[in-house]
Amino acid sequence: MILDGYWKRDLYQIRAGLLFWCKMGFSALSEHRINRGLLYSAAIIRKIAEDEKEAEHAAENNQMTMPPLPIIKTSIPVKRYRHIDPDKFFVNSKVFLDDYDLKHAKTDQLSLFQVCNQIIHSYAWAVVHQGRRIHGVLFASDREKEIDAFYLALEDWISTIQTVIDNSAI
């Protein structure tokens, strides 16, 4: 379990860094810092969610009552893009963004745990920007790359990090 308070401090710093680099505009350095912040925060948040699941399971097995565990119940809005070219992965073994139907997004809600898993196990990854304005990230995990890619707005991720800081038991 991750019970020390340093994780919350790290999440606070990552959140501040993401806000800063988004304001700086798109560059190779801001892209790197955003990638690093997303990956590190996803790893921390997934561990918190795993700990909550473990605590919930232990409480059920021992017939104990527990206070609400907010992180495993948190969801986050994403846009889902269907994979449309089933043969390319086998031929090229690389993911191309044009393999997805980027013109037809389906708005969805995924659990925070699912989003963290998708980010941590991402096979396809792109920071989405228009000119210098950074909007979010497009990603697909190694297991689901031939099904869907997901778009996550950075403002939603930054807001979610704040929710974790405010509501987690760490």
Image (cartoon, rainbow, N blue to C red):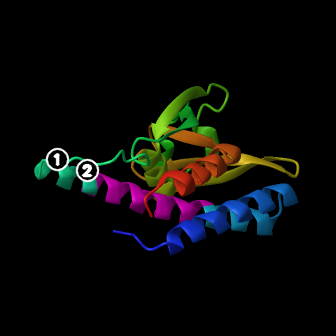
Q: Nearer the viewer, residue 139 or 58?
A: 58
Residue furthest left in the image: 62
Query: Residue at the spot x=56%, y=33% of the render?
Result: 81
In the rendered image of this protein, does residue 67 appear above or below residue 31? above
Q: Which residue is mark 1?
A: 60
In magenta segment, residue 35: no
Q: Which residues are magenta?
A: 38-54
Res 17 → quadrant: bottom right
Type of the residue with mark 1? Glu
Q: Secondary structure at mark 1?
A: helix
In the rendered image of this protein, does residue 139 appear above or below residue 33? above
Q: CB under 8 Å between callouts 1 and 2?
A: yes
Where residue 146 appears, x then y in whole percent? 45, 41
Type of the residue with mark 2? Glu
Where residue 157 appears, x then y in whole percent? 62, 48
Q: Which residue is mark 2?
A: 56
Relative placement, left or right, of 40 versus 32 is: left
